[in-house]
Image (cartoon, rainbow, N blue to C red):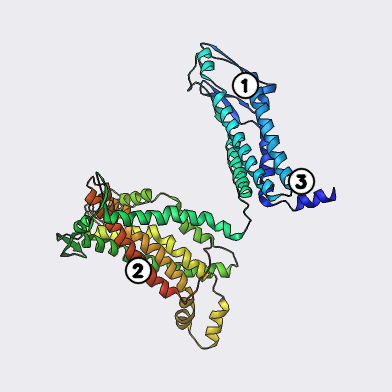
Amino acid sequence: MSELKERFKLLPLHAIVMAVVGFISLVFMFVPMFELYVQYVPRKVYSHFTMLISPKVEVTLRDKNIDLNFLKFGAVMFVATIIVSVAVLTLSLGYYLFVDNRKKKRIGCLVIMGLFFVRGALHIVTLSKMITPDILSAQGMTTQRLYVAQTLTGNILIVLLFIGMVAALYGALGLRVSLKMFSYPYILWVVVFTILPLLLIAFRAFFAKTSGGYEFTLGGFDVLFEKKTVTSTFYGMQVNLQEYFSVFLRSLDFAVWTTIGCLLVSYPLAYILAKRTKRLHKQSSMMLMLFVLPMWMNTMLRTYAWRAFFGQTGVLNNFLLNIKVIDAPIGFLKNPMLADIITKVVMVNDFLPFMLLPIYSILVKIDDSLSQASRDLGANNVQTFSKVIFPLSLPGVISGIQMVFMPSLTFFMIPDIISEGSTTTIGNTVQTFILNESSTYQQAGNVLSLLLLIFVLITMGLLRNQDKDAGSGGGMVL
C-alpha cells in the first residue's frame, strides 16, 4: 500500500491530466448536456443517464402532439460512453501505477488518446443522432422546429477532451516538462502569423501571378516608381511630387505629428498620475483607467463621433451659433487646413493610451529617493527632471513612440472618415492596390508593403539603439 502511495506521488503531470479528464468525462455522463427544442422552445435537458431514467417527452402543440422516447438510443450511447470513460480512467492510472516499461507507457498513452477521441465522437453522435430524419418524419416536424442543441457543459467537455488528448500525445511522444516548452506555442504563432505572411509579401513583391503560375517580374516597382507627379497641399503650400512619394509624405506627416502630440500630452499626464499614485501609496491609479476606457469603444464609432462634433450641424457649430460667435456654420471638415489639424487631433486622441501606459509604468517605478538625493546634491527641480527623471523614463518614452509611430504610419481609417475619402494615405493605397483585379497592381501593393516594412524595421532599429543603454522598465500598470 505504501508503495502504491509513492507511485501516486510520482505520477507525471500529463498522467494526472489524463486521469482527471477521464474522471470528469465519466462524471459528465450524469450532467445534462443536450437540450431538446420543440417549436423553438427548450423543453427538456438530457444527460446520458437521464435518457435511461426519464427518456420520454410529451409536448402538446396547437396542431399536434409530440411524443418522443429516447430509451433505446440512450441505452446504447450510455453503455458505449461508460465503457470508454471507465477505460480511459483505468488506463490513465494503471499504466503509470503498475507498468514500469517506458515503451508500454507510451503505447498506453497512444491508446488513451484514441479513447479520448472516441469519447468525443460518442458525444457528437449523441448530439447529432438524437433527432433522426425518421423521427422528424414521424412527428411531421422540420429540423428548425425539432432539434437538440449542446449546452455550455457540453462545450466544456469538448475542450477538456481536447486537453486530455494533448496530454496523452505528450506522454506518447515521451516528452518532459520544461519551461522551454511553453515557448513553443508562441514560436508557432510567430511563424504562422508573422514570418510566413512577411515571406509571402516578399515573394509576391517579385513574382506576379499568371495563368501558368508565378513568374519573376518588376512590374510592381514600375507602377510604384512611375514618373507621374501630382500637386499636393502641405500646410497651405502646393508642391509637385511623385504620386506615391506624396502619399508616403502625407502618412509620415500624420504619424510624426500624432507621435509628437501623444508625447506632449502623455508625459506630463503620466508624471502627474505617477506622483499621485506614489503619494496615495496605491498599486495603480483609478485616474489612469479613465484615459484607458475610450480604448474599449470601437475606433470607428469614436471617429464618427468626432466627425459629428465638427460637422456643419454638429455640436461645435451649434454651440458657436448659440453664443453668437458666428453667424453661419463653419465647414471645419471642408477646409483642407482645418480638416488636417482635426485629423491629427483625433489620431492623438485615439493613440494616446499607447503612449501614456508605457511612460506611466516607468515613472511610477522610479524611486523618490533618487529625486531627494539629487536635491541634496544641489540640483533644482528642472535639473533633477532633466538629469535624473527623464533619462530614467526614456525606456517608456521610446516604447511609447514605437507603439504610436508604427501603427499611425499605416492607419487610414481616421483620415479617411474625417476627410470623407479625400485624403489618401499609405493604408488606402495598399488596400486599393491589393483589391485591384490587375496582378501588376496587386504586386505593387506588396512592393509598397515591403518597402514600408523595411522603413519600419530601420526606424525600430534606430529607436532600439537609443534604448540600448536605458534598460527595460517592466510591464504596464493598470
Provide the secondary structure element on which disc 3 rests.
helix
Residue 182 occupies which quadrant of the picture? bottom right
Which residue is identified by label 1? 73
Q: Which mark is residue 129?
A: none
Q: Callout 2, which amino acid?
A: Ile
Which residue is identified by label 3? 98
N-term-proximal mark, 1 vs 3: 1
Q: What is the residue that sits farthest to the bottom in this orientation? A: 378
Residue 176 is left or right of residue 462, and the answer is right
Is the Cβ of the residue at disc 2 closer than 8 Å to that at disc 1?
no
**Front one among 150 and 400:** 150
Q: Callout 1, which amino acid?
A: Phe
Residue 473 drawn above or below residue 18: below
How many residues crowd mark 3 within 10 Å: few (<14), some (14–19), many (20+)?
few
Q: Nearer the viewer, mark 1 or mark 3?
A: 3
Residue 348 drawn above or below residue 85: below
Q: Can you give x and y, in whole percent of width and height, for residue 181 in the image?
A: 57, 57
Which residue is identified by label 2? 458
Does residue 267 appear in this view? no
Residue 142 is left or right of residue 73, and the answer is left
Residue 465 is left or right of residue 64, and the answer is left
Q: Can you give x and y, in whole percent of width and height, for residue 421 in the image?
A: 24, 50
Q: Residue at x 46, y 71 (%)?
A: 395
Q: Nearer the viewer, mark 3 or mark 2?
A: 3
